[in-house]
Image (cartoon, helix red, strand yellow):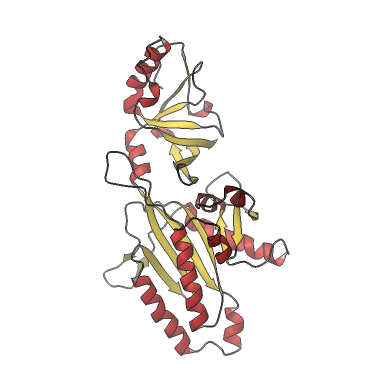
């Protein structure tokens, strides 16, 4: 671990970092400049500002394991509260220090390649949309071949209007996926996260399912990192008989877990049927007009994979939720 020259700094390894506290991640290339400016500031140089050195990536640490640290990354807290659960590998950690008499937040210095990948990679939002009471509709004979063909054709038309979203339909379900980036200074990659657009698309699909099948729908939503971070929305083989969603990671796993938890909660009377079931990290990233309204929204627990943190989902009728949001 990198050693700092002055007793003014408290240092620690990865295992000693405080959990659940505001922490700043920085590229290791700034270590020497960061230390030098801090020492000048501590020595009374009024022109030395440690907070102008380099660029910070705000995080908090949920847990430290043998492989590294489970972290919550905050790519945007300026106009939305956007949290992404991700992982800092132990081999990417370089050093951690804090000017203990002047600052409470540790600065964690990491490998530049890992930090660039964090900011420049594509992440994903997923939504699984399903028809309500499809089994009963099929049994009663109200679903005809003509209706399902009309649904498929209409989905083609809607998908053509949303080229940044992939539509995978099977049976009465549609899996939606869209990618977003966090962006990084001094690059052409910008922050492109606008999850509210998927809720507006859900309303379009509501109208479509009602007009073609006469059925209501519900949707399960989640967002986060995706291990296919340099790939397009979909992969279609040259023979056109293999389609890959290019999806591997927490959000894709979350949608089935949330749906299972919601079905169980509805059966047990914990909450009524709703149209939207959304992972709490995605829900809290929405741009509400009134933050108190967001904080009081009903939720229920579920156990996510790939993280030690407990999970929860929020449930809502789509129109009610959209009426509380800033215009997308």
The residue positioned farthest toward the top in the image shown: 43
State the image coordinates of residue 144 (x, y, percent, origin top left).
Answer: 50, 89
Q: Residue at x 53, y 26 (%)?
A: 16
The part of the image, by quadrant, that contains residue 76 is: top left
Image quarter hosting the N terminus: top left
Q: Residue at x 37, y 59 (%)?
A: 246
Q: Is residue 326 above or below residue 112?
A: below
Q: Is residue 239 above or below residue 181?
A: below
Residue 285 appears anywhere in the view: yes
Q: Residue at x 39, y 34 (%)?
A: 92
State the image coordinates of residue 38 (x, y, percent, origin top left).
Answer: 40, 17
Q: Nearer the viewer, residue 171 or 34?
A: 34
The part of the image, by quadrant, that contains residue 124 is: bottom left
State the image coordinates of residue 169 (x, y, percent, origin top left).
Answer: 44, 73
Image quarter hosting the C terminus: bottom left
Q: Is residue 159 left or right of residue 77?
A: left
State the image coordinates of residue 308 (x, y, percent, origin top left).
Answer: 57, 44
Q: Residue at x 46, y 45 (%)?
A: 79
Q: Is residue 154 left or right of residue 219?
A: left
């Amino acid at each position: 671990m990198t050693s700092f020259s002055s007793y003014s700094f408290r240092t620690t390894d990865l295992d000693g970092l405080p959990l659940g506290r505001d922490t700043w991640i920085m590229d290791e290339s700034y270590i020497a400049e960061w230390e030098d400016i801090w020492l000048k500031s501590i020595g009374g140089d009024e022109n030395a500002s440690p907070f102008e050195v380099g660029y910070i990536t705000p995080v908090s640490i949920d847990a430290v394991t043998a492989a590294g640290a489970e972290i919550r990354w905050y790519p945007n807290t300026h106009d939305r509260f956007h949290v992404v659960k991700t992982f800092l590998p132990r081999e990417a950690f370089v050093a951690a220090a804090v000017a203990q008499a002047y600052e409470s937040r540790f600065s964690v210095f990491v490998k530049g390649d890992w930090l660039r990948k964090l900011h420049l990679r594509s992440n994903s939002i997923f939504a699984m949309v399903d028809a309500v009471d499809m089994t009963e509709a099929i049994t009663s004979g109200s679903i005809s071949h003509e209706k399902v063909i009309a649904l498929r054709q209409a989905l083609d038309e809607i998908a053509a209007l949303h080229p940044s979203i992939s539509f995978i339909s099977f049976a009465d379900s549609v899996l939606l996926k869209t990618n977003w980036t966090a962006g990084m200074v001094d690059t052409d990659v910008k922050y492109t996260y606008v999850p509210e657009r998927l809720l507006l698309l859900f309303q379009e699909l509501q109208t479509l399912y009602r007009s073609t099948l006469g059925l209501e729908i519900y949707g399960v939503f989640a967002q986060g990192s995706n291990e296919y971070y340099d790939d397009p929305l979909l992969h279609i083989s040259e023979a056109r008989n293999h389609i890959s969603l290019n999806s591997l990671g927490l959000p894709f796993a979350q949608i089935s877990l949330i749906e299972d938890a919601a079905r169980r909660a509805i059966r047990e009377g914990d909450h009524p049927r709703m149209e939207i079931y959304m992972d709490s990290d995605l829900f809290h990233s929405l741009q509400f007009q009134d933050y108190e309204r967001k904080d009081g929204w009903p939720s229920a627990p579920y156990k996510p994979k790939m993280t030690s943190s407990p999970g929860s989902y929020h449930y809502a009728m789509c129109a009610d939720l959209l009426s509380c949001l800033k215009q997308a």
